[in-house]
């Protein structure tokens, strides 16, 4: 990753997030996926893919920071629609690290059944997620990566 790019507040927070993910990856995996096996390997790969995607976004954001609002990242405030035949209900929340998730403050873990499939999606994308209430389809309506999402930048 090219750390010499000029860093705005958003960019510097994302760089710090990547540093923490890199330095704490094993600890994170040990805490949330202590059993070596398929789930741990999938999460290890998932975190590596997420890190590479954010590095590419930071490089493309060198001249235009708005590209950071075009993809769901850890720290993104997003609005989604639940797509059903009866109605379209919307909800807004921030995707966060598991230790900072708090439903009362509309902060969900990126490991949750809703958070996990939303990472790296874009406005207009439709994803299917499994929740305790059953399988639902949701559409990403808007994304905003803001400095106010302070708790989500680092674990």
Image (spheres, helix red, strand yellow):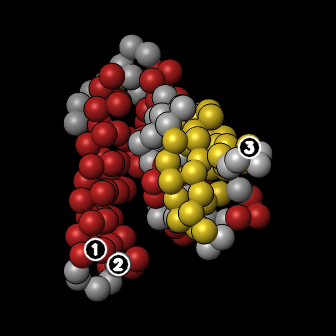
Q: Is residue 52 left or right of residue 77?
A: left
SS at mark 3 in the image: strand
SS at mark 1 in the image: helix
Residue at horizontal 54%, vertical 32%? 124
Q: In the displayed image of the protein, which residue is found farthest to the top?
A: 63
Q: Is residue 96 visible?
A: no
Give neighbour class at mark 3: few <14, some 14-19, many 20+ (Cα, 10 Å): few
Q: Position of residue 103 (x, y in %)?
A: 70, 64
Q: Return the residue at label 2.
A: 33
* Residue 37 drawn above or below residue 48: below
- Considering depth in this image, is 90 or 66 the residue closer to the camera? 90
Q: CA distance from mark 3 to mark 2?
A: 35 Å
Residue at horizontal 50%, vertical 37%? 125
Q: Position of residue 122 (x, y in %)?
A: 48, 34
Q: Position of residue 67 (x, y in %)?
A: 45, 24
Label 1–label 2 contact, CB within 8 A? yes
Q: Return the residue at label 3.
A: 88
Q: Earlier in the sequence, mark 1 or mark 2?
A: 2
Q: Is residue 17 left or right of residue 85?
A: left
Q: In the displayed image of the protein, which residue is found farthest to the front?
A: 85
Q: Which label number is shown at residue 40? A: 1
Q: Earlier in the sequence, mark 3 or mark 2?
A: 2
Q: Position of residue 46 (x, y in %)?
A: 30, 57
Q: Which label number is shown at residue 149? A: none
From the image, state whether disc 1 or disc 3 is nearer to you: 3
Residue at horizontal 45%, vertical 48%? 119
* Residue 130 drawn above or below residue 50: below
Q: Is residue 45 visible?
A: yes
SS at mark 2 in the image: loop
Q: Quadrant of residue 7?
A: top left
Q: Earlier in the sequence, mark 1 or mark 3?
A: 1
């Amino acid at each position: 990753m090219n750390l010499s790019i000029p860093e705005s507040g958003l960019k510097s927070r994302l760089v710090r997030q990547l540093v923490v993910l890199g330095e704490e990856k094993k600890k994170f995996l040990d805490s949330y996926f202590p059993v070596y096996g398929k789930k741990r390997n999938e999460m290890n790969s998932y975190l590596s893919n997420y890190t590479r995607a954010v590095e590419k976004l930071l490089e493309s954001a060198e001249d235009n920071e708005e590209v950071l609002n075009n993809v769901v990242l850890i720290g993104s405030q997003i609005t989604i629609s639940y797509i059903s035949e009866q109605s379209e209900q919307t909800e807004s929340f921030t995707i966060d690290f598991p230790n900072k998730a708090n439903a009362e403050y509309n902060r969900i873990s990126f490991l949750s059944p809703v958070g996990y499939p939303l990472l790296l999606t874009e406005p207009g994308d439709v994803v299917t997620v499994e929740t305790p209430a059953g399988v639902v389809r949701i559409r990403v309506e808007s994304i905003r990566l803001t400095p106010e999402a302070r708790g989500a930048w680092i674990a």
